[in-house]
Image (spheres, coloured by chain):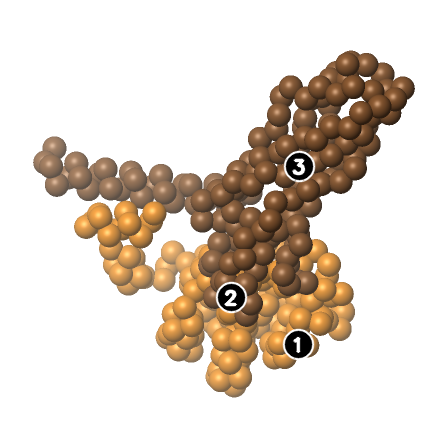
Amino acid sequence: MLILLASACSSYKPAAAAKAGNNHLKAAPSFSLPDANGNTVKLTDFKGKVVILDFWATWCGPCKIEIPWFIEFQRKYKDQGFTVIGVSMDEGGWQTVRPFVEEFKMNYPVLIGNDDTAQSFGGVDVLPTTFIIDKQGRIVATHMGLTSKNEFEKAIQSLL
Amino acid sequence: MSLKKRSSLFCSLLLLVALRSQAQLASGAHVVAVETPQNVKVKPGAGVEVPLRLIIRGGYHINSNAPAEDYLIPTALTWESSALTPKGVTFPKAESVKYEFAEKPLLVFSSLVTVVARFSVAADAARGPLTLSGKLRYQACTDKMCLAPRTLAVSVPVTVE
């Protein structure tokens, strides 16, 4: 519906919004979540890095399309100050998530999320929901639902 | 106000409405509604079938009761204990749909489906009105995104006569 409306309305110019300054950007909320080894991982541990923060779940089909891209990005840009962080919203915790991480050979930090974390990011009901965070820890973009690989990669390259 | 300005204002309002609808969805709205019969009558010692119509929002599907893949969350209907004993649920035949995100076709429900819950009534059941209380658990997706699993309360008024 939005696409149809945007096409019909000549005054709708997403490109103009994209060119707006960065002063309005919000800082990404901090969180502390457990990783597979029981260690607590904080978003602030990645300060100074460009971060793709991906909220996902094992039962989410569209998430499974994006995860191989994120694995590729992690391999390609990790040494340039970039990381992906996956936050699983599976109710089953590591018992559910661990086999998936192993099967997909996920090479970036994966954490188990909770409602508080989701709420702090404005409520994450749609999966995948992906936040792109710049080196200053600010949310540059939010994608709800499957997004194109090219769009993610262009964002990473422009922020590095 | 010029025609161009009015047109622009109208489009802005439409976009605001559309964006608000999306935000409401993200805040936890259900994409499934359950239509229940309002006049179920049953005699002691007999059985009864209760049809429930699941109305699934356009563009969404929910997993069937027996999804094709283990990782998917099945649709399930459960009942709280009452004078009527649950005897099972019959789901309709699922649609087999191939999505970009899955290697093989998935078994899903979309649009409108009818689920039939069966109950038996004890021979010595007290006569009068009662309410069957159940929970429908489902997990919905489009071809681009998924919503968290949700549980919907289902309530069916029944009269034992």
Label 3 chain ID: B
List the residue tagged with mark 2: B101
In the rendering, at what x and y percent does residue A28 appear?
52, 60
- Please tell me which of labels 2 and 3 falls first in the chain: 2
Q: Are marks 3 and 1 in contact (CB under 8 Å)?
A: no
Marker disc for residue B88 = none
Left or right side of A130 for B161: right
Q: Which secondary structure, mark 1?
A: helix
The amino acid on which the numbered mark 1 sits, given as a three-letter code, is Glu
Q: Amino acid at mark 3?
A: Val
Mark sitting on residue A103: 1
Circle 2 chain: B
Confirm whether circles 3 and 1 share one chain: no
Q: Residue at x 68, y 63 (%)?
A: B70
**Residue A88 visible (yes or no):** no
Colour assignment, chain A: orange
Label 3: how many residues lie within 10 Å, few (<14), some (14-19) or many (20+)?
A: some
Q: Which residue is mark 3?
A: B116
Residue A148 relative to residue A43: left or right: left
Q: Marks 2/1: CA distance?
A: 16 Å
Taking depth in this image into account, of B55 and A112 the one nearest to the observer is B55
Task: Find residue B20 and report its horizontal and vertical position in percent.
Answer: 41, 41
Task: Please tell me whether residue B104 is drawn above or below residue B45 in the rendered image.
Answer: below
Chain of residue at mark 1: A
- The brown-coloured chain is labelled B
